[in-house]
Amino acid sequence: MLHINIQKTLHGNLGNMELDVAFHIKEHQFVAISGPSGSGKTTLLRILAGLEEANGEIEVGGETWLCNKTFLPPQKRGLGFVFQDYALFANMSVAENLLFAANDKKLASHLLELTQLKELAHRLPNSLSGGQKQRVSLCRAFMRRPKLLLMDEPLSALDPLMRTKLQHDILTLHKEFGTTTIMVSHDPSEIYRLANRVIELSHGKIIHDASPKELLLKTQGSQKFSLTGELLEILKSDVIYIAIVAIGQQIVEVVIDEEEALRFRVGERVQVSTKAFSPSLSKI
């Protein structure tokens, strides 16, 4: 069981903000932390890792990491951290990066086998693709058999196909090692595929704490289909208006009336929904 109750004043572009969160996480859960930029997600992970100080309490498996009398340093917290920028040692091979974390050749070999990196064990990081580097970073995090794995948008720089592959690797390792995992992510499909719980932050506070299905599968009233995207442009075509909306990796057109064209603003987050049709799936 993880018990987290922390407070910290954050200084941002819009002034001071109070990060004030309290929640429990069961052992072996996979929890996604979501929310807009500047809501405190990364700071929360850094506090859990011991990379930043805060007020409050953190208790993991009966061990106190933070309280008014205790601040356990990062190297004693028994956790793994996977960063967005890989953070690999450029002068060390793939295998050496893993063995630097823990001198366990059998475990290193097993991890490289699981993530299909064994043939690259003697390569240097600068000769690897982004996806390969992130797999190395993930393997290195598991070399210490962490009680807690923290990941800060680890796949955001990768293309969709590689993201899907790495998501599978993350889930495989999470289950095999029985790790408790907390991951910051903005990607709804990633959250849905990996997490069994989502904690959403806004302005340093928890505004939702639910399962991915409860939080992400949103429809209102009689709506049958609903997607969220960014309004890129509003075009006038004869007597109608067309809204251009980015939804994930797709750009779609939605016909709107004049009143809606005046009400919406380019750059806003919008919800595209329909009541009248039944969606179908086809292979591409």
Image (tube, helix red, strand yellow):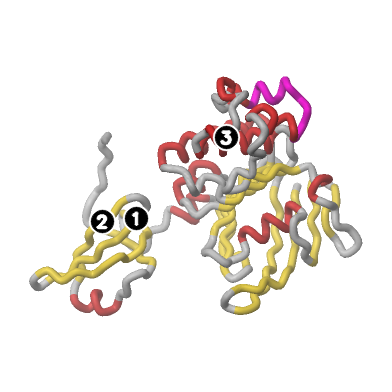
**What residue range appears in magenta?**
101-111
Mark 1: which secondary structure?
strand
Residue at 54%, 61% (x, y): give it: 35
- The reply to whether discs 1 and 2 touch (Cβ–Cβ < 8 Å) is yes
- Position of 189 relative to 167 (above/below): below
Cα distance between the residues tagged 3 and 1: 28 Å
Asked whether the viewer can see residue 58, the reply is: yes
Instruction: Write down the residue under mark 3.
Output: 135
Please, which residue is most extreme toward the front here? 91
- Check disc 1 and give the amino acid type: Ile
Instruction: Confirm whether the magenta stretch covers residue 206.
Output: no
Cα distance between the residues tagged 1 and 2: 7 Å
Please, which residue is most extreme toward the left here? 238
State how many labels appear. Answer: 3
The numbered dot on residue 247 is: 1
Residue 195 falls left or right of residue 182:
left
In primary-sequence order, the first of circles 1 and 2 is 1
Picture quadrant of residue 115: top right
What x and y, as percent, mark residue 278?
24, 48
- Check disc 3 and give the amino acid type: Arg
What x and y, as percent, mark residue 77?
80, 46
Instruction: Write down the residue under mark 2.
Output: 252
Neighbour tally class for label 3: few under 14, some 14-19, many 20 plus, Cα within 10 Å: many
Q: Main secondary structure of the magenta part?
A: helix
Mark 2: which secondary structure?
strand
What x and y, as percent, mark residue 7?
74, 68
Residue at 61%, 73% (x, y): give it: 12
